[in-house]
Image (cartoon, helix red, strand yellow):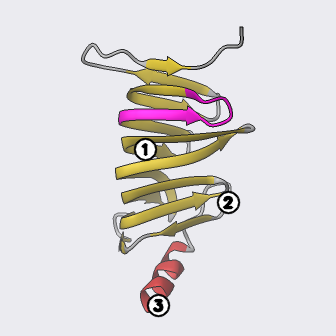
């Protein structure tokens, strides 16, 4: 109980640039105030509005006590809202850059748009929320895949 209270108090200062509340939970929490870095591990969950990120390890990089980048590894999964659509995805590594509002899914990357069941697969997927763009990159002669249905 005391651990959760301390963790909650430490994380209260973690808010986005737009002052939107971010809620973070994990089994273990390490904060390095000097280097402005936090490492969370064990059933990590981050909630920001309707967006949810889950992983077994999360590193949060900060500047002036504000998060600038999140790197999730070990079973990284997410759910994000863009416009009126919901996306689920996963990958070996998930990087969110706050300033650019971009997501990078690296290694076994996939995203599913729930409303239409459109699917993206590749070695790396970059989602730019500001510009509403997507890029799928594959390597080792593997194709990037896009799966969708058409009405005939």
Q: In which quarter of the image is residue 116?
A: top right
- Which x, y percent locates residue 120? 49, 26
Q: Where is residue 89 in the image (x, y as percent from the top left)?
A: 49, 40
The reply to whether callout 1 and callout 2 are in contact (CB within 8 Å) is no
State the image coordinates of residue 50 (x, y, percent, origin top left).
Answer: 66, 54
Magenta-drawn segment: 107-118
Tell me if mark 2 has few (under 14), some (14-19) or many (20+) residues whose alpha carbon lies within 10 angstroms of its own: few
**Observer-nearest residue: 71 or 138?**
138
Element assignment for label 3: loop
**Mark 3, residue position:** 1
Name the mark on residue 20: 2
Q: How far apart are marks 1 and 2 (CA)?
A: 19 Å
Residue 123 appears in which quarter of the rendering?
top left
The C terminus: image quadrant: top right
Q: Can residue 137 be seen in this view?
A: yes
Question: How far is the residue under mark 2 from the one under mark 3?
Answer: 26 Å
């Amino acid at each position: 109980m005391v651990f959760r209270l301390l963790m909650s108090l430490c994380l209260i200062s973690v808010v986005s640039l737009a002052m939107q509340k971010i809620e973070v939970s994990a089994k273990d929490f390490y904060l390095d105030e000097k280097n402005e870095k936090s490492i969370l591990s064990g059933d990590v969950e981050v909630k920001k509005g309707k967006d949810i990120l889950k992983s077994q390890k999360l590193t949060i990089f900060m500047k002036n006590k504000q998060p600038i980048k999140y790197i999730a590894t070990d079973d990284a999964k997410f759910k994000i809202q863009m416009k009126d659509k919901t996306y689920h995805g996963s990958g070996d590594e998930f990087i969110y850059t706050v300033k650019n509002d971009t997501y990078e899914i690296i290694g076994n990357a996939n995203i599913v748009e729930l409303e239409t069941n459109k699917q993206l697969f590749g070695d790396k997927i970059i989602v730019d929320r500001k510009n509403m763009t997507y890029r799928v990159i594959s390597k080792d002669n593997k194709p990037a895949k896009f799966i969708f249905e058409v009405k005939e």
